[in-house]
Image: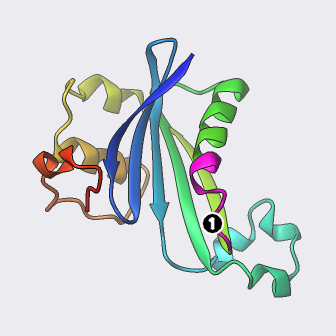
């Protein structure tokens, strides 16, 4: 059985922790980059096969990162991909970029209750430019977390 905890939900950033049969699989980080595809993203599948004219339809890039402590098998990667796409797939004119990162050391250091600094480490590992240093976790008790 797959379950999840929504750790952080901001306007342009969401962080989830996914579980399979009660065991942590890893973090799913979704960032709305609020920019069109760059030249590097245009070289990635499936965008490298799309005509430039059609690429211009994609006016926004949503970056999806999966951070785990071990390499995920194909089935587990598909679980993350389906979950993420279910959250963002209905966004018109958006391109998706999915990355998988393995970092066992990060998971060994984490406390049970993460603090802002721990989430910043997650964002640093995936090379995110998102700044949450001013975030107050005590304000995240509301459905709207911005």
Residue found farthest to the top: 21
Q: Is residue 77 above or below residue 63?
A: above
* Residue depicted at x 16% and y 40%: 115
x and y, in percent, of residue 52 in the image: 83, 84
**Is residue 86 located in the magenta-colored stretch of the structure?**
yes
x and y, in percent, of residue 37 in the image: 64, 76
Q: Is residue 83 above or below residue 85?
A: above
x and y, in percent, of residue 71 in the image: 58, 27
Residue 29 or 123: which is nearer the viewer?
A: 29
Q: Is residue 8 above or below residue 76?
A: below
Residue found farthest to the front: 143
Give the residues drawn in magenta, as a range.
85-92
x and y, in percent, of residue 41 in the image: 66, 69
Residue denoted by label 1: 91
| 82 left or right, relative to 67 | right
Label 1: few (<14), some (14–19) or many (≥20) C-alpha neighbours in 10 Å: few
Asked if residue 42 can be seen in this view, the reply is yes
Residue 78 or 6: which is nearer the viewer?
A: 6
Residue 109 or 88: which is nearer the viewer?
A: 88
Q: How is the image coloured?
A: rainbow
| 113 left or right, relative to 91 | left
Q: Residue 135 sits in which quadrant? A: bottom left
Q: Callout 1: helix, strand or loop?
A: loop
* Residue depicted at x 67% and y 71%: 92
Q: Residue 127 sits in which quadrant? A: bottom left
* Residue depicted at x 40% and y 65%: 12
**Is residue 59 located in the magenta-colored stretch of the structure?**
no
Asked if residue 102 can be seen in this view, the reply is no
* Residue depicted at x 59% and y 75%: 60
């Amino acid at each position: 059985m797959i379950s999840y905890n929504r750790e952080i939900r901001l306007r342009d950033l969401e962080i989830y922790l996914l579980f399979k049969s009660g065991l942590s699989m890893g973090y799913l980080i979704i960032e709305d980059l609020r920019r069109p595809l760059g030249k590097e993203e245009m070289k990635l599948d499936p965008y490298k096969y799309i005509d430039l004219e059609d690429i211009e339809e994609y006016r926004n890039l949503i970056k999806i990162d999966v951070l785990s402590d071990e390499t995920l098998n194909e089935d587990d990667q598909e679980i993350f991909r389906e979950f993420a796409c279910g959250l963002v797939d209905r966004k018109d004119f958006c391109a998706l970029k999915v990355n998988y990162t393995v970092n066992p050391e990060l998971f060994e250091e984490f406390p049970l209750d993460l603090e802002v600094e721990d989430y910043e480490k997650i964002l640093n590992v995936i090379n995110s430019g998102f700044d949450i240093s001013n975030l107050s976790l005590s304000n995240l008790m509301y459905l709207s977390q911005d």
